[in-house]
Image (cartoon, grey):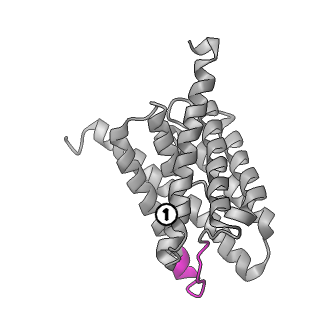
Amino acid sequence: MDMRSPGHRSDLRKYLAELIGTYALIFCGTGAIVINEQTQALGHGGIAMTFGLIVMALIYAFGETSGAHFNPAVTLGFVAARRFPIARAFPYIAAQVLGGVFASLTLHLLFPNDAMLGATIPSGSVWQSFFLEVILTWLLMLVILQVSQGSKETGLMAGIAIGATVGLEAMFAGPICGASMNPVRSLAPALVSGQLAQVWIYLTAPIAGSLLGTTTWQLIRNNDPKNT
């Protein structure tokens, strides 16, 4: 493919948007955790609000460019819903991982004495956190599919609905499981900080929850006379 072709440039813009958006999400979200540990200025509610607000802002900023996934579980959910080409999923996920790791490296440079960098650690049992993450991501993916347009999180209400869902779930479930709902949100700080022991929960449960959300959406959609 010609590197200068309009189609190739369009794809590169999408991948760059996913990288920048995921960077901003991880930098702001896990950055809020790191800063709160040092200052106690935000509290749990402030951290949850930070995640919700940055997701909302990024959807409005990048929804028209890349669809504002910023989450491998969301990308795979769109693939399962047949709203996103599987051939584009790997570059999207690669861009998301790079953006997340760059964000955690930035936080490590800014706060070199922080041992966790906002890594997601269960405070309850492993399986309690696993199933909470499945349920949280199930609900998030269901909301995303209901309010998005195709594979794009766009539209007047999409940012508000999705950002509010992230903030709400982080608010009530964060103290137990971390409310990751995003493999990259957990993988990036775990890789940079070396806190890898329980990261498998946050790689597998959000993907399982996303696919479950897609299945639920398909059942709802297929039973709706307007969609038959």
Residue 18 higher or lower than 28, as above or below: above
Q: Is residue 113 magenta?
A: yes
Is residue 61 at least partly visible in the picture?
no
Residue of label 1: 100
Quadrant of the image containing the N terminus: top left
Q: What is the x, y in percent for residue 137?
A: 62, 48
The residue sitting at the left extreme is 2
Residue 123 higher or lower than 109, as above or below: above
Q: Is residue 226 left or right of residue 13?
A: right
Residue 138 higher or lower than 174, as above or below: above
Quadrant of the image containing the C terminus: top right
Say what secondary structure mark 1 lies in: helix
User: Who's the residue at 58% across and 19% down the image?
Assistant: 222
Is residue 20 at least partly visible in the picture?
yes
Q: What amino acid does circle 1 point to?
A: Gly
Q: Residues within 10 Å of mark 1 (few under 14, many from 20)?
A: many
Q: Main secondary structure of the magenta part?
A: loop
- Closer to the camera, 20 or 82? 82
Q: What is the x, y in percent for residue 211?
A: 53, 41
The number of callouts visible is: 1
Give the residues in magenta. Answer: 107-118
